[in-house]
Structure formats: structure tokens, C-alpha cells
Amino acid sequence: MQSVLAPFSTSISELKRNFSAVIKQADDEAVAILNHNRPEAYLLSAKHYEQLLSYLEDLEDEKLVRERANGKFIEVNLDDL
């Protein structure tokens, strides 16, 4: 059985019938959209999605810093730039 990775879930049919109510009930949490009792998609608020993207960007930046930390460094004078 596939895990539901959200605190709330609803069926596709219920989402079609009551989209506004589902959004309101979920508040700022993810909602699993179920099709035949299996997660088909996840619905996120715009705020939650933006936070997720920001977090992913931070992780990518951290990865670059770690990769470059042991690299070859070139000494430069700021006045020469």
C-alpha cells in the first residue's frame, strides 16, 4: 500500500465538488488527492509551495558551497578586479 504523505486527504470527486472547502480546511498544510484510495497528487497552498522552493534553493546553494570548499583557490586583489 502506498503511503499518504500529507496530514489531510480527499478524493478527486470531493475536490471537484468542494474545492473551496478543501482549501479552507487544509489551511496551510498539504492535501493528498486520492484516486481509488491511492495518492494521485498533492495540493499545496501558494505560500507552502513558495517556502518549499526557497528551501530547495538553500539546499542547492549549500551543496555548491560544500563542493567548492575543497577546491583550488586563486588569490586576487579586489583593486585588480
Image (cartoon, rainbow, N blue to C red):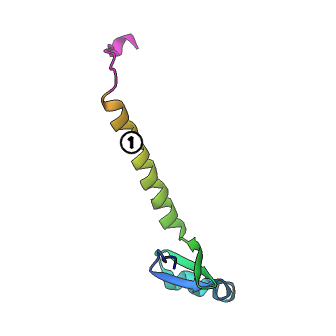
Which amino acid lies under the numbered mark 1 shown in the image of this protein?
Lys
In the foreground, 69 or 58: 69
Residue 1 position in % (x across, y down): 51, 79
Residue in the picture at 52% in, 78% down: 31
Q: Which residues are magenta?
A: 71-81
Q: Is residue 45 above or below residue 80?
A: below
**Residue found 38% across the figure and 10% down from its top:** 80
Is 77 covered by the magenta stretch? yes
Left or right: 17 with respect to 42?
A: right
Residue labelled with disc 1: 63
Residue 39 in the magenta stretch? The answer is no
- Seen at 37% across and 34% down, the residue is 67
Label 1 Cα neighbours within 10 Å, binned few <14 / some 14-19 / many ≥20: few
77 vs 9: above or below: above
Residue at the front extreme of this rendering: 1
Q: Is residue 36 left or right of residue 55?
A: right
How far across and how far down the image is residue 62, in percent? 36, 43
Above or below residue 37? Residue 42 is: above
Task: Measuring from the top left, give residue 7's x and y in whole percent.
Answer: 44, 80
Task: For mark 1, give the secondary structure.
Answer: helix
Pick the front one: 33 or 23: 33
Task: Report the residue at 36% width, 31% height from top.
Answer: 68
Q: Main secondary structure of the magenta part?
A: loop
